Image: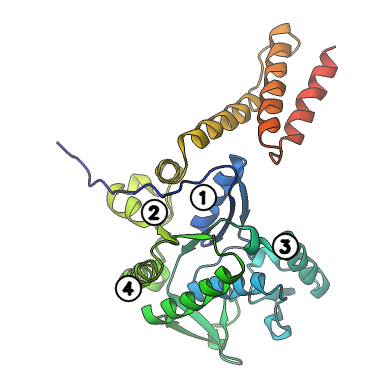
Amino acid sequence: MNLFTSVAASKISPQLDYNDVLLCMGSCFATEIGQRLQETKLRCQLNPFGVLYNPMSISSSLRILLENQFPAEDDIISHDGLWHSFSFHGDFSSPTKEGLIANIHHSLDACRDVLKRVTCLFLTFGSAYVYKCKENGKVVANCHKLPEKLFIRNRLTVSEIVDEYSSLLQDIWNVNPTMRVLFTVSPIRHIRDGLHENQLSKATLLLAIDQIKQLFPDRVLYFPAYELLLDELRDYRFYADDLVHPSHLAVDYIWQRFSEACFSQDTLMVMKSVKEIKNMIGHRPLHPESEEYTRFLQQIVLKIETLSEKYPYFDFDKEKESCLTKLNRLH
């Protein structure tokens, strides 16, 4: 007897491993997945522009990375004592213009030429609704709480998204022909738009991604995060207190399904080892002066050295240094 509707998540081929370079961009669900990728020590750049919700802002951000640009001067504004960029999330805002520009440069410098190196681009669309600045007609990534009268709000069409990404992806493939793109639609509902409008928005995104996938079947992939939460986990116990965002348990489940679909068995084993190390480091000893704890710390260091030897780009320096410091205190 089946008590829920099972959602199929086909395995991607070839599957991802620790040799891959990943770039995650999009809504806060992309952040959830990206943080887990980083925690498992995969080489992953995460939301260099901050959280982005609509496809056009994601596309504009990718073009900035592709062309090594800096946002235009009319992209930068001052409001409520802070300087903001219409292309960047509020996390980058600063009390001074110089601070904002420094924050932007720091993020862009960290991602310089990333699109030439990335092997899998992970994009999560959150909403098909966009806000256009009345003054110049540009789509903004973030309104930064400016008055609504300064913007025009409308819903993108399927063809607008498909046309934009057909051109964008071709431009990226011109410099990185082997890159694959993995799309998801965020399962987080935008109830401010209204429930019916949210459904129209998500449907637009799903149809657009499907058409993009049909245009580039060998290079474009889709993972059903939206369907997993809305169909397989169809219960409010899988939502946070706001009844909009998925709960920690739900994100863990979607991450598990994502891992099974995207990673090879060897990679999953390495990820398990990384998690074991992190759990060991987080362990609070009952007797920190004992020989048993000394051996425990030595095991952690050995595990870190074994993994780092195989994967030199693993960043376990802080964890290893912490363990060695504790060992020195015990001797």
Above or below residue 61? Residue 7 is: above
Q: Nearer the viewer, residue 323 or 68?
A: 68
**Residue pointed to by mark 3:** 107
Q: CA distance from mark 1 to mark 2?
A: 10 Å
Is residue 94 something one can see in this rendering?
no
- Residue 265 location in percent, x, y? 46, 34
Task: Say which label, 3 or 1, has the lower sequence index.
Answer: 1
Q: CA distance from mark 4 to mark 2?
A: 17 Å
Question: Disc 1 vs disc 2: Cβ atoms closer than 8 Å?
Answer: yes
Question: Disc 4 vs disc 1: Cβ atoms closer than 8 Å?
Answer: no
Q: CA distance from mark 2 to mark 3?
A: 28 Å
Which element carries disc 1, helix, strand or loop?
helix
Task: Say which label, 4 or 1, has the lower sequence index.
Answer: 1
* Left or right side of 144 for 251: left
Which element carries disc 2, helix, strand or loop?
helix
Question: Disc 3 vs disc 4: Cβ atoms closer than 8 Å?
Answer: no
The circle on residue 225 is: 2
Q: Tell me the amino acid under the disc marked 4.
A: Leu
Question: Disc 3 vs disc 1: Cβ atoms closer than 8 Å?
Answer: no
**Residue pointed to by mark 4:** 200
Q: Tell me the amino acid under the disc marked 1.
A: Ile
Task: Say which label, 1 or 2, has the lower sequence index.
Answer: 1
Q: Nearer the viewer, residue 60 or 171?
A: 171
Question: Disc 2 vs disc 3: Cβ atoms closer than 8 Å?
Answer: no
Instruction: Single out the mark in the foreground, 4 or 1.
Output: 1
